[in-house]
Image (tube, rainbow, N blue to C red):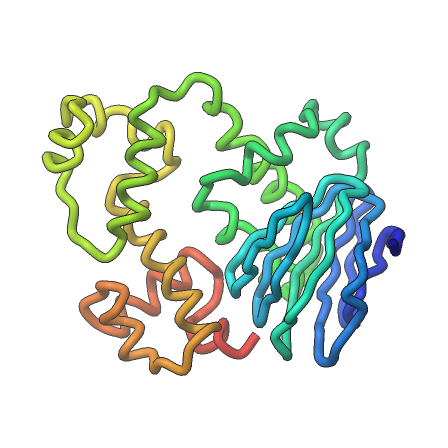
Amino acid sequence: MIALKTKEFLGKTTEQFSFGEYDISMVNYLQPVSEDWHSHEKYHLSLVLQGGNLESRKGQDIQILPGSIVLYDKEIVHRNRHTAFPSKNLNIEIDDDFFAKNELSTSDFQNSIVKNVEVQFGLLKIYKELHINDVSSAASIHTSLLTLFSDYNSVLNQRPPWVDKIREILCDRWDEFITLNELSNELNVHPVTISKYFSKYFKCSFGEYMRRIKIEKAILYLKHTDKSLTEITFLCGFSDQSHFSKIFKQNTGFKPNEFKHL
């Protein structure tokens, strides 16, 4: 078993940024690397920008695709096989001090990510900020990380059961036009109640949330297929390519063509 130290990865690190309590690395996989079981010294999360693999841990195999977010507890043992070349990951390793100073428990690390559509977009904006790299970048990245770990978790223990059911319905039927009344009837929750509290639990309006789910699907199409932007635009339910590009950039910080060639 290989025990990797901070800022060590099996692939080739092409860029690295240190911010005291966390380190951010861009890691490329251009050729086969060790498929042995290994672990990492710190908590970290990876956003898969390109490629992917089959990850094994605790008797479970997980297919990792472009757009996937993978979380790693400290020293959790896992291995990666069948890597697609080229692959590219954004890795953020986090010190214990980050949790202590910001009054976060390590469980926040897990809970803030689960079922939170905002995380992928937040990580992409961090990636964009790394390459702006001006005097405001460090503060911007720190704020983004705190947001990722706190926004969803702040309502985790108080949200009503219908919130998770809405997430499930909207994700399963992402390519349909679902009205508020349909949701209300299916959940047996008054539409006024959904309207009143939706933004509290989802951090955006109903329409914005639906568009964000469609952008998540577009990310998969961009990185995992050879479909044209025109095809992806209509597959994801946007009326024209200009509108699609505008919404994509609002959520990710990148134009679709820029993201496709990251």
Is 147 rendered above or below residue 44? Answer: above
- Residue placed at 32% from the left, 57% from the top? 214
The quadrant holding residue 74 is top right
Residue 18 in the figure: left or right of residue 66 = right
Quarter-wise, where is residue 229 in the image? bottom left
Residue 137 position, x and y percent, is 66, 54
Q: Residue at x 30, y 53 (%)?
A: 211
Lateral position of residue 199 relative to residue 195, left or right: right
Left or right of residue 178, residue 259 in this image: right
The answer to whether one can see residue 155 in this image is: yes
- Residue that sits furthest to the top in the current view: 158
Residue 139 appears in the figure:
no
Residue 85 lies, in percent from the top left, at: 63, 79
**Quadrant in which the N terminus appears:** bottom right
Nearer the observer, 17 or 1: 1
Rendered residue at 78%/51% (across/down): 23
Residue 258 coordinates in the image, percent (x, y): 49, 75
**Residue 176 in the image: x percent, y percent?**
18, 54
The relative height of residue 88 versus residue 189 in the rendered view (above or below) is below
Q: Quadrant of the C terminus?
A: bottom right
Q: Quadrant of residue 126?
A: bottom right
